[in-house]
Each structure stands twice: as C-alpha cells, then as structure tokens.
Amino acid sequence: MAETLHDLVTARKMIATSADWTASGRRLSLKLPLAIDGLIEEGLFLRGSSLSHIPDREVVLQLEYHGVRIAGETGPLCRAEWNPMRPHNNKGKGPEDLRYKEQMLSHMHSFEDNWDDIAGALTPDNLPIARPIIATLSQFIDFRDYVGLKFGIMNIDLVKTPEWEYVLDLGSE
C-alpha cells in the first residue's frame, strides 16, 4: 500500500474501469480511477483533457490525487502535454538550463522535478516545472503509451483515442 505521494507516483498502477472521453462544450475529458496491488486507491485518478474540435493538439494526461489517506497537498502529481497550442516556460524555476526557456512542443511536468525535498511538498502553482519530451510522439497512441510508461500505468491501452470532431473549414466566400 502506498504510504506517500512519491509511493503513489512510483507504484505500478492499473486503470480500474474503462470509460470513454466525454464532451463538455469545446472540450473532451476523461477521469479514470487507478488501482495499486489490485485495490482501488481512493482519490487517485488519471485525468485527460483535449479540445474537441482540434484533433491531435492540446492533449493533457495527468496523474492526480484527491484523497485524505496520504498526507500532503492534493491535486496534480505529474502531467504530460502533447502538441500544446501555447508555449510553456518554467518562469525561472527548476534546472538552470530550462528556466524561462520557451517550450513549444510536447513536455512533461514530472513529480520529481516539482517535488521540494526541503518543504516536503510539491512546488506551488500547479506543477510549474516541465521538460521537453524527447521521444517521437506522432500520434495519440504514441503519447498514451509514453504516459503509461512514465506514470507506471500497466494497462494504459484502455485509454481510447479521443473522438475529435473533424470540422471542415471552407473559409469565407
């Protein structure tokens, strides 16, 4: 059984139930409970988010904890962003080589980079430190599998490709 937030992140996890992406306005979302050692860990989820009308862009998968059993702040533990629409920079935080550097491509907000050993907590401001993802992630399934590896989710293949709305833009006449 996980005793710390670090244990939650590093444990081998399984998606407990499969679910489809759901549409809400212009977004698609996904929230899946996770199990560790065959037991659903209350408050531990894989959350997904994407724009519904722009395929293969602005996809986020995030490991988060909203429980009370383990001490520490609740919320996002780590996050991966695939083909974001806006750049990210670490606003002067994190490793010197990544401070203020515009990251235009896919990137990972890891637990390790955002954990403050001195404070014994995650860095404030919603996982502000990110690193570029070096792997080639040309399609959603590549991204999904990468996240499964990094987040320790053994059955990540249960996460289906979002059902994007393909909108034909004929321009103005």
Image (tube, rainbow, N blue to C red):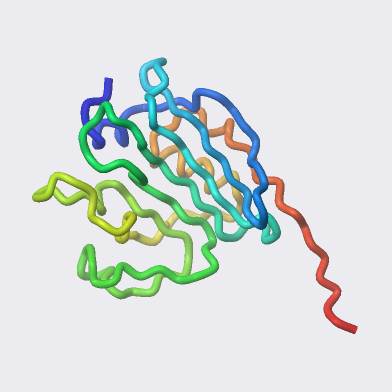
Residue 33 at x, y = what percent?
47, 29
Residue 43 at x, y = what percent?
39, 31
Judged left or right of residue 120, residue 143 is right
Above/below status of 132 relative to 144: below
Judged left or right of residue 43, residue 70 is left
- Tell me which residue sits at (65%, 42%) in the image: 22
Above/below status of 151 relative to 169: above
Residue 167 at x, y = what percent?
79, 62
Residue occupying the far bottom of the picture = 173
Find residue 71 and report its image quarter.
Answer: top left
- Tell me which residue sits at (45%, 25%) in the image: 14
Asked whether 21 or 134 is in front, the reply is 21
Residue occupying the far top of the picture = 38
Which quadrant, please, contains the C terminus?
Answer: bottom right
Judged left or right of residue 27, residue 134 is left
Above/below status of 173 relative to 17: below
- Tell me which residue sits at (20%, 69%) in the image: 96
Judged left or right of residue 28, residue 128 is left
